[in-house]
Image (cartoon, rainbow, N blue to C red):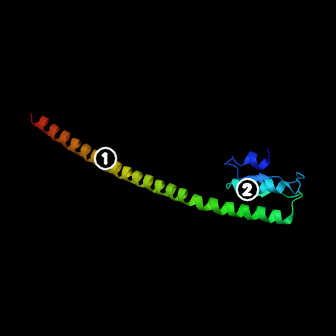
Amino acid sequence: MSLGRCLKGIRSLQHINLKDNSLAAESSDAILFLLKENCNIVHCNVKLNMFKYTALEELNQICKRNKELNKASEMPYIRREIRGLKKKRAEQGLFVEDLGKFRRQIKQGEQEIAVGLEEMSKVEDVI
């Protein structure tokens, strides 16, 4: 089984370093296959191998294409994340606002209790 077929299903793979592996010119076909099949791979280092210049150019072009594809597919995800964060922030803002209202109500209640206790002590003094 070729390297390209083995690695094509690994979707988390983004960078490949095959530097100085004495790979023959024919190996470039397997690498090209891998890069075409797995669009998540955006960098492939094949320095110090025996690849033809045309194969190296094609490898670079496919990596650039993959990078653009990944960037385009990440934008909707990033937008969803931002919307979710804005929603959470708004919810937290409402929570803080509610918390402020509760604090004001507690303070008002404490003041009313203090006034009530003061009035009770006046009544007790009279009795």
Q: Looking at this view, is 43 or 121 the one in front?
A: 43
User: For the N terminus, which image quadrant?
Assistant: top right
Indicate the position of residue 116 as horizontal and vertical percent values: 18, 41
Labels 2, 1: front one: 2
Position in image of residue 30 (x %, y %): 79, 53
What residue do we see at 82% from left, 56% from top? 28
Closer-to-camera residue (17/56): 56
Residue 111 visible in the current orientation: yes
State the residue at coordinates (74%, 57%). Answer: 43
Q: Mark 2, residues whose alpha carbon is within 10 Å: few (<14), some, or many (≥20)?
A: many
Tell me if label 2 and label 1 are in contact, CB under 8 Å: no
Q: Is residue 75 left or right of residue 58?
A: left
- Say the numbered circle drawn on residue 102: 1
Sequence order check, earlier mark of 2 and 1: 2
Q: Residue furthest left?
A: 127
| Numbered badge on residue 43 | none
Front residue of this view, candidates 126 and 57: 57
Residue 103 point in image, percent of width and height: 32, 47
- Asked if residue 56 is positioned above or below residue 114 in the image, the reply reads below
Q: Amino acid at mark 1?
A: Phe
Q: Measuring 51% from the left and 55% from the top, which residue is drawn there?
A: 81
Tell me where residue 54 sits by quadrant.
Answer: bottom right
Q: Which residue is mark 2?
A: 35
Work out whether residue 41 can be spotted.
Answer: no
Q: Is residue 45 left or right of residue 9?
A: right
